[in-house]
Amino acid sequence: DGGITQSPKYLFRKEGQNVTLSCEQNLNHDAMYWYRQDPGQGLRLIYYSQIVNDFQKGDIAEGYSVSREKKESFPLTVTSAQKNPTAFYLCASRRTLTGGNYGYTFGSGTRLTVV
Amino acid sequence: AQTVTQSQPEMSVQEAETVTLSCTYDTSESDYYLFWYKQPPSRQMILVIRQEAYKQQNATENRFSVNFQKAAKSFSLKISDSQLGDAAMYFCALDGANSKLTFGKGITLSVRP
């Protein structure tokens, strides 16, 4: 079945460490997104990529980095510069055909906790 | 910039009754899409319903329907015959030409048996 796989499901980070969250999709979608979810904040956009080897900052990109070397993969690195990384992270993808927008497909998320 | 506002943080409905979740938005674009997503305790985001802004007809999906008022920039979700499985957090979202899905803060819906 096609879908988005995020790993790991739970991740613990020590102060000062960089960690990378994985996001892989086999939907042949062009665009991929990373969102952060905090209680009472909804989902906020971190980074997005419309095509391979290109990506743009979202609303809260500071302290994060991404790469898009393959269409299927869009990993997110949470760097030590991110002051409050404890949150739930969601990856999403969307097909970018003309003529319609049928919504975004989401992965099951990664819960990151700073210890 | 586009914004989405969900002003009610929580709502409760009796099983089998109807409930309406409110959402307002702001955008300078004329062509955009609106969505309602459901997030159950598993935290998996599930698309409930979508609305194309250029279509005047309100979207429906089984027990779920929307009241889309473009001039008022309002996009409410009506759930009919509420079921226990409808209990979840619901997010209203807007996708414009820049292809950045913007979410409201969500509303927690509880269903009383």
Image: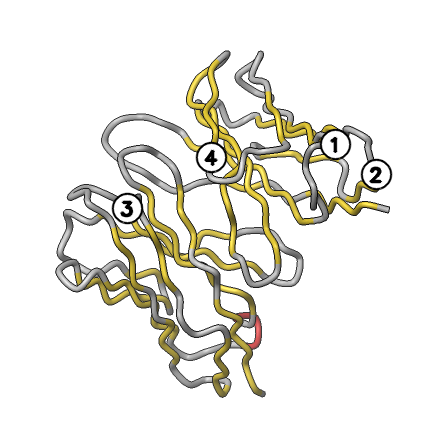
Rendered residue at 48%/63% (across/down):
B106
Q: CA distance from mark 1 to mark 4?
A: 19 Å
Q: Is B106 situated above or below A14? A: below
- Same chain, marks 3 and 1? no
Q: CA distance from mark 3 to mark 4?
A: 19 Å
Residue that carries the numbered disc 4 in the rendered image = A58
> For the residue marked with disc 3, what is the amino acid?
Tyr
> For the residue marked with disc 1, what is the amino acid?
Ser
Q: Chain of mark 3?
A: B
SS class of the residue under badge 1? loop
- Same chain, marks 4 and 2? yes
How packed mark 3 is, by other alpha carbons closer than 10 Å (few <14, some 14-19, many 20 or more), is many
- Same chain, marks 3 and 4? no
In this rendering, position of residue B5 left or right of residue B15: left
Residue that carries the numbered disc 2 in the rendered image = A15
Sequence-wise, the earlier of marks 4 and 2 is 2
SS class of the residue under badge 4? loop
- Same chain, marks 3 and 2? no
Rendered residue at 34%/49% (across/down):
B94
Tag 1–tag 2 contact (CB < 8 Å): yes
Tell me the mark number nearer the camera, choosing from 3 and 1.
1
SS class of the residue under badge 2? loop
Residue that carries the numbered disc 1 in the rendered image = A80
Horizontal and vertical percent for residue A33?
51, 33
Chosen colour scheme: secondary structure
In this rendering, position of residue B92 left or right of residue B11: left
